[in-house]
């Protein structure tokens, strides 16, 4: 059964996937804005076996201008808990 491409289209619009070809725009604007948009995933998987630092490093890859995960850990008062499991 062929897929409709809705999930792929959504991932491209969210900036989580690069397009293979063609152009994508929203309200006439190209995706230059995508680095400024945030998303909240409905499911992100089970991260119980990952440390705080590993989870932050993983999710920081979703944004091109993310802060250093170690800096974020300190900023939110989790210094010393980097290796704690989530």
Image: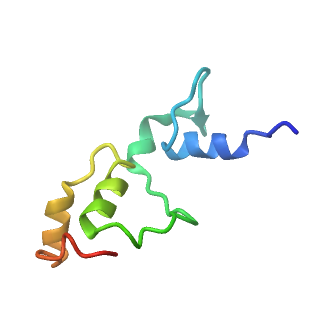
Question: Which quadrant would the N terminus be assigned to in this image?
Answer: top right
Q: Residue furthest front?
A: 49
Q: Does residue 43 appear left or right of residue 52 in this picture?
A: right
Based on the displayed image, in which of its 4 quarters is residue 3 positioned? Answer: top right
Q: Residue at x 19, y 75 (%)?
A: 76
Q: Position of residue 35 (x, y in %)?
A: 39, 44
Q: Position of residue 75 (x, y in %)?
A: 15, 71
Residue 7 vertical placement versus 46 (above, below): above
Based on the displayed image, in which of its 4 quarters is residue 54 positioned? Answer: bottom left
- The colouring scheme, among rainbow, by chain, secondary structure or one colour, is rainbow
Q: Residue furthest right?
A: 1
Give the mark count: 0
**Which of the pair 67/32 is nearer the observer?**
67
Q: Residue furthest top?
A: 21
Q: Residue at x 38, y 69 (%)?
A: 49
**Which of the pair 83/64 is nearer the observer?**
83
Residue 79 vertical placement versus 28 (above, below): below
**Which of the pair 26/62 is nearer the observer?**
62
Q: Does residue 29 appear left or right of residue 68 in this picture?
A: right
Q: Position of residue 80 (x, y in %)?
A: 11, 76
Q: Residue at x 73, y 39 (%)?
A: 5
Based on the displayed image, in which of its 4 quarters is residue 43 positioned? Answer: bottom right
Q: Does residue 78 appear left or right of residue 56 in this picture?
A: left
Q: Does residue 5 appear left or right of residue 72 in this picture?
A: right
Q: Residue at x 49, y 35 (%)?
A: 31
Question: Which quadrant would the C terminus be assigned to in this image?
Answer: bottom left
Residue 36 vertical placement versus 42 (above, below): above
Q: Position of residue 57 (x, y in %)?
A: 28, 55
């Amino acid at each position: 059964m062929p897929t409709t491409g809705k999930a792929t289209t959504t991932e491209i619009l969210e900036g989580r996937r690069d397009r293979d070809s063609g152009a994508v725009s929203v309200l006439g604007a190209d995706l230059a804005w995508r680095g400024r948009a945030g998303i909240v995933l409905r499911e992100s998987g089970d991260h119980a076996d990952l440390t705080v630092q590993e989870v932050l490093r993983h999710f920081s890859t979703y944004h091109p201008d993310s802060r250093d995960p170690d800096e974020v850990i300190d900023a939110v008062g989790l210094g010393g808990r980097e290796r704690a499991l989530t």
